[in-house]
Image (tube, rainbow, N blue to C red):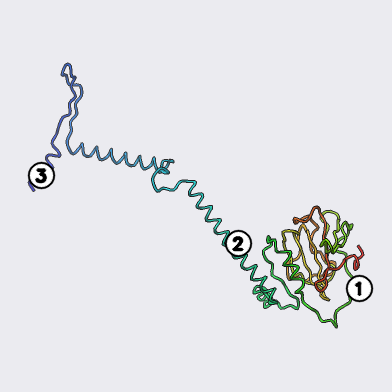
Amino acid sequence: MEEKKKFYSKLKNQYRLIIYNDTTFQSVWSMKLSRLKVFTVTSLLSAIIVVLVILLIATTGLREYIPGYPKAEYRQMLVRNALIVDSLEMELQKRDQFFKGIQSIMAGEVPEDEQTMQAEAPTTNIEFQEYNHDSVFQDELLAEQLSLSLKNDNSNATSLNQMHFFIPVRGVVTEHFKAEPDHYGIDLVSEANARISAVLDGTVIFSGWTLNTGYVIYIQHESDLVSVYKHNAELLKKTGEKVKAGEAIAIIGNTGELSSGAHLHFELWHDGTALDPEKFIDF
């Protein structure tokens, strides 16, 4: 106890700090001090300096010079890479689903999503799944789908020559059917925003975007007949919907890499074979 009292008394002992003039030895300035006061003031000043340094580093760009602290551009790069990885995962899932659908169709099976649709709303017509629209293989896939269209009863099938086709759009034929250069249809130019109509009653088996032909609609009709409407500006019907002859299904447009102006590219397919539309419809 005595040692503690001596220690506290030493802390409280008063001292005087005096500054003298070196020439005249006259006292210039003096101050009373104690060990306790010196320790207290030194501790407060050290704490204030530490807080100021922390605030300076935390609120300015100096923090980026601390070893191990990530710089702003590094953080932005990490966020950007995380977004890219997430997008790549989604694209890989779409790609896998796309190829599974192709394999199912080529094997003569119904895709899983299509089986779910048929279970919810049974129909006598095949409804094809809408795949990755940006794929360069989309047009080839649609051609394969035509050959897999539902076969109707031949006893109830009506001769194509006896069918009454509705004109898809009023306009001028600028390009005729040519099988050799793979132009399996005709090009019709009409007024801006003209509506495009279904040529017969049927069911939409595809309604969506393709890279080469833009917004496209494929309609399945009786007698294994399929009509195709390409380069549309807007689609008015979705896959699986029933349509009537003369009902508006799209708006004429100029979409797709193979289009050089607003027009309708119209095709007729029967049992997987392209037909000349001008032989059946008076344009």
Q: Label 1: which residue?
A: 161
Q: Under tag 2, what secondary structure?
A: helix
Say if 192 sits above or below 154 in the image.
above
Who comes first in sequence, dot 1 or dot 3?
3
Which percent across, then down, holds residue 171?
88, 58
Q: Under tag 1, what secondary structure?
A: helix
Q: Is residue 67 left or right of residue 161?
A: left
Q: Which kind of residue does numbered mark 3 sit on?
A: Lys
Who comes first in sequence, dot 3 or dot 2?
3
Which percent across, then down, holds residue 101?
66, 71
**Disc sitting over residue 5 in the figure:** 3
Q: Which kind of residue does numbered mark 1 sit on?
A: Asn
Task: Report if the CB atoms under discs 3 and 2 are less than 8 Å apart.
Answer: no
Who comes first in sequence, dot 2 or dot 1?
2
In this view, the residue in front, 31 or 83, is: 83
In this view, the residue in front, 89 or 137, is: 137
**Disc sitting over residue 18 in the figure:** none
Mark nearest the camera among 3 and 2 is: 2
The alpha-carbon separation of the residues under discs 2 and 1 comes to 46 Å
Picture mark count:
3
The alpha-carbon separation of the residues under discs 3 and 2 comes to 79 Å
**Disc sitting over residue 91 in the figure:** 2
Figure quadrant of residue 182 = bottom right
